[in-house]
Image (spheres, rainbow, N blue to C red):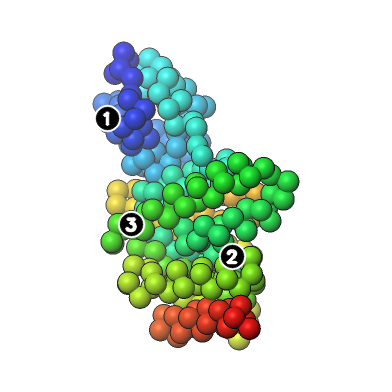
Amino acid sequence: MAGKNLDPSSSPRALLGAELRVARERAGLSQAELGEPLFVSGSFIGQLEAGTRRMHIEFARQIDDILGTAGFFSRNCGALAKSKYPNHFAEAAEAEAEAKTIREYAPLALPGMLQTESYAREVFVAYQPTATEEVIAELVTNRLDRAKLLSDPTTPLLWCVLDETVLRRVVGGGTVMAEALRHIATLIRKRRIFVQVLPFSAGAHSSMGGTLKLMTFEDAPPLAYVQGNAIGVLLDDPATVTRHSLTYDLLTASALSPTQSLALIESAAEEYEHDQHS
């Protein structure tokens, strides 16, 4: 392994994870035993091995020392360092691409994976009002690239709970909103996604603190991601993920049924279209 380098064009994160598993097992260590000197959980090591978490250089150096891999991981983790997403979201986006299921609560805006081009552009201009058109265009392109995950007919399974605020806050005007809501309705009717709307009438609910994303994987422990303004945290502690899973279950219990939610989404789209025609 010491003289081998990974090909950055062939999913380096997954390849590096596979090499980590081989090196760890060769050293006779469990995931928990390797994680202990790194001050991380065995679940975290499992996510590195499955390619759902990015290996940072500080971990790579320590892993090389512990496993005696002659700088292999330090050299090759550089292939994972660059991302087209902001630092606070980069790992979550990479995990999202490997997820088997994604459950997301959106309190203020449509989830990025469901945004149309015009809706995404309005959001980014609002976030960065002094950015150049080139910067905005790149941000929009990267967001639309994430939506390509839905081109697969079944994976990932995407289940979203939208706060009614998302439907009522006019982003970019009636035409933009109508297009965005029609897009979501189309995906629902194609049975590609599940969507529930949490109505204002639900009152206080389990996730009034903000956004929540839960991801499960084929061969790695689940993750939770919570996000604020220009900050996000990817969580792997099993107890914390379980608590957030309960939060999401309570949200779905308080939300409208999928059928009622689709009716409300399409009704809101019709209202925006009518207002534009008027």
Q: CA–CA distance between discs 2 and 1?
A: 43 Å
The amino acid type found where label 2 is placed reads Ala
For the question of whether residue 220 can be seen, the reply is yes
For the question of whether residue 254 can be seen, the reply is no
The amino acid type found where label 3 is placed reads Ser
Camera-near label (1 vs 3) is 3
> Is 189 situated left or right of 145 in this image?
left
Above or below — where is 195 with respect to 216?
A: below
N-term-proximal mark, 1 vs 3: 1
The amino acid type found where label 1 is placed reads Val
Dot label at residue 22? 1
Residue located at (32% from left, 72% from top): 190
Tell me the quadrant of the picture where the C terminus can be found.
Answer: bottom right
Above or below — where is 134 with respect to 256?
A: above
What is the x, y in percent for residue 122?
Answer: 62, 58
Q: Are marks 2 and 1 in contact (CB under 8 Å)?
A: no
N-term-proximal mark, 2 vs 1: 1
Dot label at residue 109? 2
Q: CA–CA distance between discs 1 and 3?
A: 33 Å
Above or below — where is 198 with respect to 51?
A: below
Q: Secondary structure at mark 2?
A: loop
Dot label at residue 151? 3
What is the x, y in percent for residue 133?
Answer: 63, 45
